Amino acid sequence: MKYLLDVNALVAALWAAHEHHARIHQWLAALPDADEVLTCGLTEIGFVRVINAAYGVPVAVAKEALSEFRSRAEIGYLETTPSPCDTLPAWAHSHKQVMDAYLVAIAEHHGAKLATLDRGIPGAKLAG
């Protein structure tokens, strides 16, 4: 199975001070070797934005952490994303749902599931 990490799961994976850091690492460690963990431009820029805003981490340090994470063999990167106009799920009715819905659509477009720490996202897999 392939899993696209959402922004919150990516922050939890890379930032030890995140409240779900241990939880996401336990989930990642329990994945079968054949499974693939993915990021994309949208989740990576979200990581940089959140880690800078919430924790005051300089952008250069966030980029370095991301680069180190991506260098691991089991981490893949989705270079292409489908158009939101063509793929945004019908259940996205508000600004609070648009990003999650689009990430679900990106994951599905690539034969993956969105891995998240948030409950209630249709089509997503709860990580941990």
Image: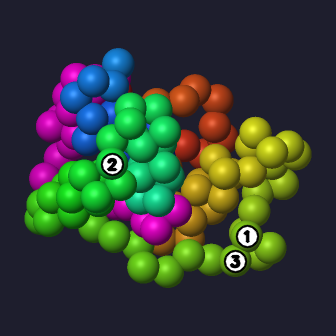
Read off the residue under disc 1: 84
Q: Looking at the rendering, which quadrant does residue 121 occupy?
A: top right
In the picture, the quarter occupied by the C terminus is top left
Left or right: residue 66 compared with residue 72: right
Q: Which residues are magenta?
A: 20-42
Look at the numbered discs 1 and 2 and tell me whether their residues touch, using CB distance below 8 Å.
no
Quick one: label 2 or label 3, which is nearer the N terminus? 2
- Tag in front: 1 or 2: 2
In the picture, the quarter occupied by the N terminus is bottom left
Left or right: residue 127 compared with residue 82: left
Q: Position of residue 97 (x, y in %)?
A: 74, 43
* Residue type, label 1: Pro
Read off the residue under disc 2: 58
Question: In the image, which disc is placed on residue 83?
Answer: 3
Left or right: residue 107 compared with residue 98: left
Left or right: residue 73 compared with residue 103: left
